[in-house]
Amino acid sequence: MADIVWRKEERLKRKGIFLLFSLFSFLFSLSFAQLTLTDAAGTEVTITDTSKTITLGGDITEIMYALGLEENLVAVDTSSLYPAETEVLPKVGYVRDLSAEGVLSLAPSLIVATGDAGPPEVLQQLRDAKVPLFIVPTEDSVDGVKTKIDTVASIFGAEDRAEDLKRQIDLDIAEASLYADAAQAKAKPKVLFIYARGAGTLLVSGTGTSADAMINLAGAANAVTEFADYKPLTAEAAVTAAPDVLLFLARGLESLGGVEGIAALPGLPLTPAYENGCVVAMDDLYLLGFTPRVGQAVKDLTIALYPDVADIAESD
């Protein structure tokens, strides 16, 4: 008889624990249902479910992984190339050239996008479909990266991990500054950034671009300050800029046939950079994405621009 009573009490205890757990889960779902945030477009977005998230923008996707939130992802855009695990996820098109049908076909519960996502009419179609669309603020700076990290973390409740990421960024940036100081150069190297997609698409970065920001963070000087944004490369502009270093995206330099292909480009063979063999190429997203790896990217760029500090970096 005592055994029967004990078993009945045990069943009641288990049932009570289950009901208590269910109550907590229900209350949590109610509290999460009340999460309303204002995005970079000034739109109030109410988020009720993050379990089927689509990210639009390689930087946003990388932040999701860095925060340990990858289990929430059901798809990404084609600019999301890092980390390698993104390869197995469905792709919904290029971030700047999306189609509403491709995104909505995966029935997302939430879309988190960079400010570059578009075109605008497609974003409006997504909003009209009643899918929460949150635009993350985008600024090409270290503070801008931190804001992106904080914003994504606030959506998913990952604030503690965000603080760790931001601390590491600060440490890496500080280390990069030490490398530049250790080089003791008489003058900052002048860097000419060239965006290339084959010989038919050659653009030079002026001020106010992500490339300009990275060059400055690495303790160097942009060789072109006469204009903002990008302009087509001309022989005259290249010669006048007289850069000490030519900086390319890795895929861009590959599209030209590698370093050898530079010889056929207007004006570049006449620059000090080309004559001295000072050509640097870095991964697209790594160099210009302003992702959680921005501190490491600045360190690597600094070392590439100041070869004298390579031994110091290796000893660290």
Image (spheres, rainbow, N blue to C red):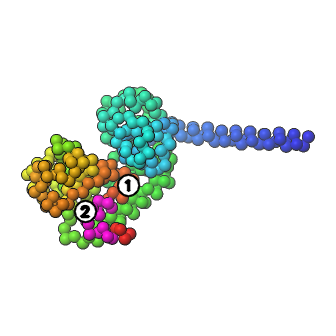
Asked which quadrant contains residue 14, the reply is top right
Question: Which of pointers 2 and 1 indicates the residue nearer the eye?
Answer: 2
Residues in magenta, as a range: 299-312
Give residue 202's position: percent from left, percent from top: 17, 45
* Mark 1 secondary-structure assignment: loop
Question: In the figure, is residue 303 to the left or right of 44?
Answer: left
Residue 98 sits in quarter: top left
User: Image point 35% across, 66% down: which residue?
Assistant: 175
Residue at left 31%, top 51%? Answer: 283
Q: Position of residue 304 (x, y in %)?
A: 27, 62
Q: Which amino acid does label 1 sit on?
A: Arg
- For the residues labelled 2 and 1, the Cα–Cα distance comes to 18 Å
Secondary structure beneath label 2? helix
- Is 308 magenta? The answer is yes
What is the tally of numbered marks visible in this picture?
2
Rendered view: 308 above or below 301: below
Residue at figure coordinates x 20%, y 53% from the top left: 259
Q: Which of marks 2 and 1 is nearer the N terminus?
A: 1
Examine the rendering and report whether any part of residue 178 can be seen: no
Disc 1 target residue: 293
* Residue at mark 2: 305
Side (left or right) of 189 relative to 116 = left
In this orientation, does residue 1 appear? yes
Crowdedness near tag 1: few (<14), some (14–19) or many (≥20) residues, C-alpha within 10 Å: many
Query: Can you say which quadrant of the picture contains the C terminus?
Result: bottom left
**Residue 259 falls inside the magenta stretch:** no
